[in-house]
């Protein structure tokens, strides 16, 4: 059946592996909170820990994993490191995942800073 579709193409093994790894990295509530906070702007570990409701050491470990996965990047300033989302693709991926979760929840609450009309775009 799919062979009759002219433009049908499966992703290659590396693409599938990397996509699965990205979703695995997003499979932790603390990482979701940290990434959401980073979508609002650059932040330090201490600030992210407060926003995520987690210990700074735990947030630092999560950030290291997210950085290795290419989802966040760090900028060193003296002895401090300030983190940000890696790019707009990460932002779109997280917003879509949260929007999907919101749709499944059906409680009508919009994501922070969004309305139903803007979330669907």
Image (tube, rainbow, N blue to C red):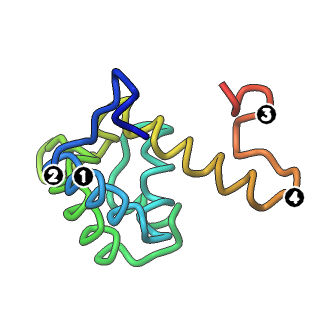
Q: Which element carries disc 3, helix, strand or loop?
A: loop
Q: Quadrant of the N terminus?
A: top left
Return the residue at label 4: 107
In the image, residue 53 sits, relative to residue 81, either above or below, namely below
Q: Is residue 60 depicted above or below 88 in this figure?
A: below
Q: Mark 4–mark 2 contact, CB under 8 Å?
A: no
Mark 3, other Cα within 10 Å: few <14 / some 14–19 / many ≥20: few
The residue sitting at 87% across, 58% down in the picture is: 107
- Residue farthest right in this picture: 108
Q: Residue 16 carries which label?
A: 1
In the picture provided, is 116 more to the left or to the right than 68?
right
Q: What is the CA distance from the residue labelled 1 to the residue labelled 3?
A: 32 Å
Q: Specify which label sits upstream in the sequence, 1 or 3.
A: 1
2 on left or right of 66? right
Between discs 3 and 2, the one toward the N terminus: 2
- Cα distance between the residues tagged 4 and 1: 33 Å
Answer few, some or many: residues within 10 Å of disc 2's Cα (few below 14, many 20 plus, some between 14 and 19). Answer: few
Nearer to the camera, 79 or 16: 16
Q: Quadrant of residue 2?
A: top left
What residue would you read off at disc 2? 13
Q: Residue furthest top?
A: 6
Residue 14, x across and y down, in percent: 13, 49
| Pointer 3 residue | 115
Please give the name of the residue rendered at 44% of the width and 58% of the height, measured from the top-left corner: 34
Are the residues at dot 1 and dot 2 in contact (C-beta closer than 8 Å)?
yes
């Amino acid at each position: 059946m799919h062979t009759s579709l002219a433009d049908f193409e499966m992703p290659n093994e590396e693409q599938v592996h990397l996509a699965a790894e990205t979703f695995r990295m997003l499979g932790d509530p603390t990482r979701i909170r940290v990434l959401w906070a980073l979508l609002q702007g650059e932040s330090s570990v201490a600030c992210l820990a407060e926003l995520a409701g987690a210990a700074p050491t735990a947030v630092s470990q999560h950030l290291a994993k997210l950085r290795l996965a290419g989802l966040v990047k760090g900028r060193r300033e003296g002895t401090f490191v300030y983190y940000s989302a890696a790019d707009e693709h990460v932002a779109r991926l997280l917003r879509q995942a949260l929007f999907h979760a919101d749709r499944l929840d059906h409680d009508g609450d919009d994501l922070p800073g969004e309305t139903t009309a803007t979330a669907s775009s």
